[in-house]
Amino acid sequence: MAVLRVKFTKTKRDKLAQVLWILNWISVVTGVILFSLGLFLKVEINKRGELMAERDIQYVPNMLIAVGLIACAINFLGGKICYDCVDTTKFLRWKLIMLPYIICTFFFTFCVLVGALMCYSMHGELEESLDLGLTEAMRFYKDTDTPGRCFLKRTVDLLQIHFQCCGNNGYKDWFQIQWISNRYLDMSQKEVLNRLRSNVEGKYLMDGVPFSCCNTNSPRPCIQQQITNNSAHFNYEHQTEELNLWMKGCRQALLEYYVHIMQSIGLAVLITWLFELSVLTGVRYLQTSLENVLRQGDPNSESDGWLLENSFMETARTNLNIIKSLGKNNQIDTSNNGDPNINVPSTSKAHYGPDNVPPKQITEDS
């Protein structure tokens, strides 16, 4: 029994072909949108690539770019097919192509769905990449005179100002690293030498943060040195002065930013998948109804269209049997240890000599 059988008159078939022609051209536009979204995400990731560890997080934008280009090509061809299918005689040139086209388009729509799901599953890898990348960027913050790292101070400062964040997980991350270069430390001061000697690794650690961590909404001048020392500042309690510094970590701020982008892109891709699936369904109905018209021989007659000619179980069973038969045809008989000369029947009988006596025996008798 056919699945979702629908009866079509000639008028309905023509209208269906015209509507599908329009929808395929709209799908070409959606392909351009997918390509643009993938390109936008790739640019946004590369824009802050120096703050991310070397992780394979480019596969999502790359897949969206590829899917967008394929969508343009597939739907352009689909629009041409549907335009010609208005005329039953022109359908003959596409008759053998339509079924492979529908199968390929089905797998393509599956790839679109995978792309949408990947946008929602990228959270963990992105968070790990940001965590490692920000830790490295903060560690090299002081290396303003080192080639290849001199730009990191400016990058981190702009990041903390733009996203109103401080450190990796919070402002206290700066307490655990030396973010001031030795060239700006006065080694003649006893306090500086004591700090360097008190650390096992010889680092100058202090309870201070860069200026870019200062909260511009703070009612008092920013306190970025001796943050945990209440006695060093008048009318100050560092545990309650939440407005003095940005409290959010930059990893969380960047993660929220990218997750918002990817969720929006994922929703757009999911809507595109539903639209592509509806267009594919209409093309399948058009193909089956036109093939039934050709079987009847009357282009003006009514015809049935369906998604599957048989039920889901019968279709699955038939395809499984086809796969099994193909597997059996490709099997190699190894029972004879690979010797091709074993069990090969002789094409002619051997004749040894007079009275069917072997030549050796004839020689001995003579």
Image (cartoon, helix red, strand yellow):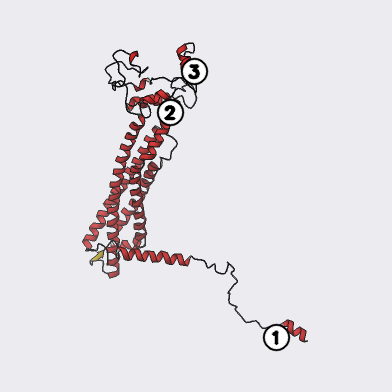
Instruction: Say which quadrant the N terminus sits in.
Output: bottom left
In the picture of the structure, the residue carrying the numbered disc 1 is 357
Tell me where residue 200 appears, x and y as whole percent: 49, 22
Mark 1 belongs to which amino acid? Val
* Secondary element at image label 3: helix
- Cβ atoms at labels 3 and 2 below 8 Å apart: no
Callout 1 secondary element: loop
Q: Amino acid at mark 2?
A: Ala
**Residue at screen point 33% across, 31% down:** 253
Of the pair 349 and 190, the residue shown nearer to us: 190
- What's the mark number on residue 137? 2
For disc 3, the marked residue is: 197
Residue 317: give x, y in percent of width and height.
35, 65
Picture quadrant where residue 118 is located: top left
Say which element carries label 2: helix
Q: How many marks?
A: 3
Q: Residue furthest right?
A: 366
Above or below: residue 329 compared with residue 132: below
Q: Position of residue 122 (x, y in %)?
A: 36, 41
Report x, y in % for residue 284: 29, 59
Q: Which mark is residue 258?
A: none
